[in-house]
Image (tube, rainbow, N blue to C red):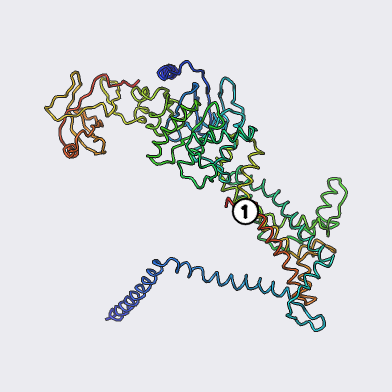
């Protein structure tokens, strides 16, 4: 007696699932016949997100860069004008800040390439499996802690009575004062973005078969020639990928200059921050913020022209 | 002693005994942690020879090649090139070039740039370099492919580029590490004769590594057979096939039957065994004849392979060429009683 309702419910759900699986089957047959449709369905959500969040925001930024703010009422004046850009290029201060940011980004990138390459090479070619895991951990552990905490840590290292001078004293050297200088910024930036340089270079080096290295030696090339003719060109996509990180992250940063840069070390980001928050001049901020975008665009074009992406 | 004697025989038969020794490996040993990859290997390669290191994987043949190339350093022993000790020289100071199993072409360079790499390293003048690259590409029949990138070539073409990149340097010795291993059968056979043609043209000593016994027999002047890190026999292809030094060689080079008779062991190759139905005479006198029963008949197309149980229980493999198209008779032969026969002098006694 007990069985009956049970049996009935099973057979209903069976029928339902049969109908459902029939529908699923028909849909999957249609998708299988039209691969373009299934690709479109897969792509639609991320593409929609991308267009809305990235492209639309960038477009809004670029458009508002050609507007102005009424300095008296603070209201935005939507008349097209180049006055923001004229103000930027006409002012020695703004030019200096832009150049300082770009030069710092370049210096940090070069430093990180020089530090990361041998490190990644050691990890790929020479380290044992255990050493490799240990080095990976060492590279990644700093990323688990807060960016702010790490920059503050450097403040303590550079301070007058800080770790750096304590060590120098212990070794019998004079103390140095590099806190709140461009040198301090350079060191901190190079430290913070180093993992983002090591990882892509590691990935690029790992893809180079060892036999290419042997072939180069076999054909009479010594280590230096092998490095510049074979290893470096093939690792170039990794170097470029890493430099995109270190370069653009430095270009856009405004916290490190405040914390370890001290006075007279403003970055583009600080000017943008001041104009959005304090001066309420969003169009000017937008105009100034487009400088890193243009610089990055030029950098990528140059990298592409030099053939860095050819071996990808 | 045995190995040395056979080596002498080998060169005489190949007509190269007069040529000077160009590569001499003596007492070379190489260990990786606790695995002995190469264990006291001695070999002498004469100028112009096509010398093959043959053996199963892990037998030490590739390690020996890498030691000669300079990619590995021996723990013991001496490697001489053209009379000079090169044991401690790095690869770039040895007058040797290598053709790699995975081709190892530089993917960011064109075919011509790949071939020119070794010449540019040596500082060969531009004009001469260009000429020699064209010449090398012509030799491997890729004269119109100079501008291509390796990724745009087929496997066989890449192998040719690898070959051109090595021979363009005119090394004393060319090392080839299973160069045809990744190619399909047809292409491999084409490349085998191609390699022989090129060797005849450039007159460079070839030191060739393969695990394919047929390839070794087809191409080599002499073969050194490796097993467990040691050379177990050196000889001409006919030497190692017809007079294998031990049971391992007998079974590794071709298939063979090992017969135990009178407390001795004999090698008998399948193609030397004749099969006839009971009561039928063999067309040759002086044969040793035994009765047997066919256990299995395998049709291979060109021939049929039979597994026959002899009266004393030994199972031997025999092949019979499919002279006629009606092979059903032979295919369905399992279970029938037959006579097998061979010429007594085709038995080779194992030491």
Relative to A293, B196 lies left or right: left
Q: Quadrant for the C terminus of chain B, please.
A: top left
**Which one is in front, B269 or A38?**
A38
SS class, disc 1? helix
Residue farthest bottom in this picture: A73
Query: Residue B65, image x and y in percent?
Result: 51, 31
Residue B32 visible in the current orientation: no
Q: Residue at x 76, y 70 (%)?
A: A272
Where is residue B140? Give x, y as percent: 48, 35
The quarter holding residue B227 reads top left
Query: What residue sits 25% from the left and 30% below the top?
Result: B316
Give x and y (percent) for residue A124: 60, 46
Quadrant for the N terminus of chain B, please.
top left
Figure quadrant of residue B225: top left
Q: Give the answer, above or below, for where B7 lies relative to B109.
A: above
Residue under label 1, please give it.
A200
For residue B252, side relative to residue A222 (left or right) = left
Q: Residues within 10 Å of mark 1 (few under 14, many from 20)?
A: many
Can residue A308 be seen in this snapshot?
A: yes
Q: Position of residue B112 (x, y in %)?
A: 56, 40
Total marks in image: 1
B167 or B252: nearer the eye? B167
Residue located farthest toward the left when viewing the structure as drawn: B279
Relative side of B10 to B108, left or right = left
Q: Is residue A272 above or below residue A110?
A: below
**Front-most of B38 and B322?**
B322
Q: Examine the rendered structure and indicate whether residue B59 appears above or below residue A158.
A: above
Q: Chain of mark 1?
A: A
């Amino acid at each position: 007696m007990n069985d009956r309702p049970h049996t009935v419910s099973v057979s209903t759900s069976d029928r339902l699932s049969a109908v459902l699986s029939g529908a699923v089957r028909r849909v999957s047959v249609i998708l299988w016949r039209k691969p373009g449709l299934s690709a479109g369905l897969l792509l639609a959500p991320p593409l929609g997100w991308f267009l809305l969040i990235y492209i639309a925001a960038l477009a809004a930024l670029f458009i508002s860069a050609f507007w102005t703010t009424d300095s008296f009422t603070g209201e935005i004046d939507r008349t097209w004008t180049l006055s923001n850009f004229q103000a930027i290029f006409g002012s020695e201060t703004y030019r200096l800040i832009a150049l300082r940011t770009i030069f710092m980004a370049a210096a940090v990138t070069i430093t990180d390439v020089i530090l990361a390459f041998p490190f990644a090479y050691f990890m790929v070619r020479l380290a044992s499996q255990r050493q490799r895991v240990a080095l990976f951990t060492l590279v990644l552990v700093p990323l688990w802690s807060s960016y702010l905490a790490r920059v503050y840590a450097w403040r303590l290292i550079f301070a007058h009575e800080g770790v750096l001078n304590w060590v120098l004293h212990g070794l019998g050297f004079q103390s140095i004062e590099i806190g709140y200088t461009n040198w301090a910024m350079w060191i901190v930036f190079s430290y913070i973005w180093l993992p983002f340089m090591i990882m892509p270079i590691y990935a690029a080096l790992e893809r180079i078969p060892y036999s290419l290295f042997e072939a180069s030696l076999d054909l009479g090339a010594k280590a230096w020639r092998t490095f510049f003719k074979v290893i470096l060109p093939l690792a170039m996509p990794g170097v470029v990928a890493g430099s995109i990180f270190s370069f653009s992250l430095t270009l856009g940063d405004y916290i490190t200059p405040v914390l370890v840069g001290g006075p007279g070390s403003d970055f583009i980001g600080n000017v943008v921050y001041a104009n959005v928050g304090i001066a309420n001049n969003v169009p000017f901020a937008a105009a100034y913020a487009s400088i890193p975008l243009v610089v990055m665009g030029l950098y990528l074009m140059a990298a592409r022209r030099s053939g860095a992406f050819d071996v990808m | 002693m045995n190995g040395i004697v056979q080596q002498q025989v080998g060169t005489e038969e190949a007509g190269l005994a007069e040529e000077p020794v160009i590569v001499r490996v003596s007492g070379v040993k190489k260990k990786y942690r606790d695995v002995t990859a190469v264990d006291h290997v001695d070999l002498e390669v004469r100028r112009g020879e096509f010398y093959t290191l043959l053996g199963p994987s892990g037998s030490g043949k590739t390690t020996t090649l890498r030691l000669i190339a300079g990619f590995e350093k021996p723990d013991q022993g001496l490697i001489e090139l053209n009379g000079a000790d090169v044991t401690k020289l790095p690869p770039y100071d040895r007058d040797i070039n290598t053709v790699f199993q995975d081709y190892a072409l530089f993917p960011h360079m064109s075919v011509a740039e790949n071939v020119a790499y070794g010449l540019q390293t040596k500082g060969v003048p531009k004009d001469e370099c260009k000429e020699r690259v064209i010449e090398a590409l012509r030799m491997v029949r890729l004269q119109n492919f100079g501008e291509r990138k390796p990724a745009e070539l087929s496997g066989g073409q890449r192998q040719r580029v690898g070959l051109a990149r090595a021979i363009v340097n005119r090394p004393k010795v060319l090392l080839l590490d299973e160069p045809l291993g990744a190619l399909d059968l047809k292409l491999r056979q084409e490349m085998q004769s191609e390699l022989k043609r090129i060797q005849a043209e450039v007159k460079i000593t070839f030191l060739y590594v393969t695990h394919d016994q047929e390839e070794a027999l087809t191409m080599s002047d002499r073969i050194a057979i490796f097993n467990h890190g040691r050379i177990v026999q050196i000889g001409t292809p006919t030497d190692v096939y017809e007079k294998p030094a031990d049971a391992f060689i007998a079974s590794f080079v071709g298939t063979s039957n090992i017969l135990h008779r009178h407390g001795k062991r004999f090698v008998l190759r399948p193609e030397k065994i004749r099969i006839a139905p009971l009561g039928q005479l063999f067309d040759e006198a002086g044969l040793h004849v035994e009765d047997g029963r066919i256990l299995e008949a395998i049709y291979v197309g060109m021939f049929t392979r039979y597994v026959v149980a002899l009266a004393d229980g030994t199972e031997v493999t025999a092949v019979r060429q499919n002279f006629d198209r009606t092979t059903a008779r032979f295919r369905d032969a399992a279970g029938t009683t037959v006579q097998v026969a061979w010429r007594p002098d085709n038995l080779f006694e194992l030491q």
